[in-house]
Amino acid sequence: MKLDSEQIKKIFAALLVLAFILYAYFAFLLGPLQKSQQDATAGIASLEPQIADAKKQIARTAGLEKEAPQATAFLTDIKNSIPDGAPIAWFPPKMTEFFRSQGIEKCTTHLVSDGADSMPGFRRMVWSIDLPKVEFIPLGVAISHLENNEPLLNILNVTIDATREDAQYQHATLVLATLVKS
Amino acid sequence: MPLHVNLYHEVQRQDRARRRDPLRLGMLAILVIAVGFIAYYFVELEQCHAVATVFGGLQDDWSRIDPKCKAAKARQDELDDQIKASDQLKKNVESRFYLAPVLGEILRTVPQNVQLLHVAVDAPADGDATTSLLTVSGISSAAEPRREAETVRTALEAKLGTEFKKVTSVFKALDDSDQLVTFNGHPLPTATFTIEFEIQVRDPIVAAPTPVRRQRIAAE
């Protein structure tokens, strides 16, 4: 079959139209569609593990929330046992009352130092307690009770000196550190 | 055989030529391809819509879960800190050095013919320190007061040794005194003494060995 020049022109025009349609189809229709599909697929692939991790995190925290009251009971009890207010106001009277209950009447408490502690939420205060007239055995018993009943209290130094006036009594000085709420 | 003359052959030729027109055939082919492409486009559109719906649902889930997750993470950090603080506090309380047992041992060990004039006990300075220092000064009265002071030292060291990990003691001073004391009706010579006890209350914390980097030896 022999094509005349008119037909060749028409075929050429048809091919041009076809090329344009193909270009438009891929560039403006199918291309953006596939791009958005790929983006959505990639988004799903990245979101699914994130959502799974988030759900695990929420579950982990919920589990921890259940265990926390038991795990932090000691801390809570300790914090609740510390009186509110300035320690300088309540600690010396507390010590005076304690030693009086142990049969040691004279007791003077002084603040030696006050600073931050490594434990968050606490301050470390160092006190000096002067007991000018005390017998050795009641002093030992009192120290024992103090150490057993006050978990936040740490006796750093005990000095006991015999008194010249009365050999029965000694002069004792205690240096102790305690944690208070900051 | 009769002679058959086709008077329409020109019309038929033109009709055949029109049917075989390449442009027409090409347009038909393009139309078929275009229909195929459009059908494929709609298939892709449907798939894309399905994927986008899933993605939108996940985005909704994420926008709902993400704030909860962040709050949960913050709460977990807070709880972890509280639990850590509680454990640390418990450890500190349990690892305290109790001074009362030391005073108890002194009371039980020192005999009546020895008078203590000064007792000082220092707890370990901090959590890393392992030793406590006990200083005892007094007057021993016996026929041999120095030997009596030595007896007190060894007895107290032995007693404290049963309570603590390791105890070492040393006389800081031991001097004869001119004074005599009457004990059970007998005058006895005296000696003044000062003994220092070093009490190891806990095992030292062994630091992890640090890797030793080989030093390059410079060629001479």
Image (cartoon, helix red, strand yellow):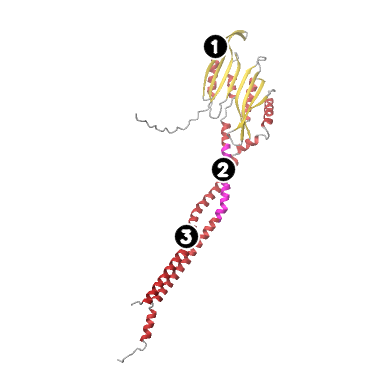
Q: Which residue is mark 1?
A: B146
Relative vertical location of residue A171 with respect to residue B39 in this rendering, above or below: above
Residue visible at 67% across and 33% down?
A86
Question: Is residue B94 one of those drawn in magenta?
Answer: no
| Kind of residue indicated by mark 3 | Lys
Q: Which residues are magenta?
A: B60-86
| Kind of residue indicated by mark 2 | Asp
Q: Find numbered disc 3 in the image and state the secondary structure of the residue it sits on.
A: helix
**Contact (CB < 8 A) between labels 3 and 1?**
no
As measured in the structure, the alpha-carbon distance from the residue carrying label 2 to the one carrying label 3 is 40 Å
As measured in the structure, the alpha-carbon distance from the residue carrying label 1 to the one carrying label 2 is 63 Å
Mark 3 closeness class: few <14, some 14–19, many ≥20 residues within 10 Å? few
What numbered label is drawn on residue B160?
none
As measured in the structure, the alpha-carbon distance from the residue carrying label 3 to the one carrying label 1 is 100 Å
**Residue A115 position by quadrant:** top right
> Chain for mark 2?
B
Q: Main secondary structure of the magenta part?
A: helix
Residue visible at 45% across and 64% down?
A26
The quadrant of the rendering that contains the C terminus of chain A is top right
Q: Which residue is mark 3?
A: A35
Q: Closest to the observer: B134 or B29?
A: B29
Q: Are marks 2 and 3 on the same chain?
A: no
Q: Closest to the observer: B208 or A21?
A: A21
Query: Residue B34: x percent and y percent?
Result: 44, 70
Q: Earlier in the sequence, mark 1 or mark 2?
A: 2
What numbered label is drawn on residue B77?
2
| Kind of residue indicated by mark 1 | Arg
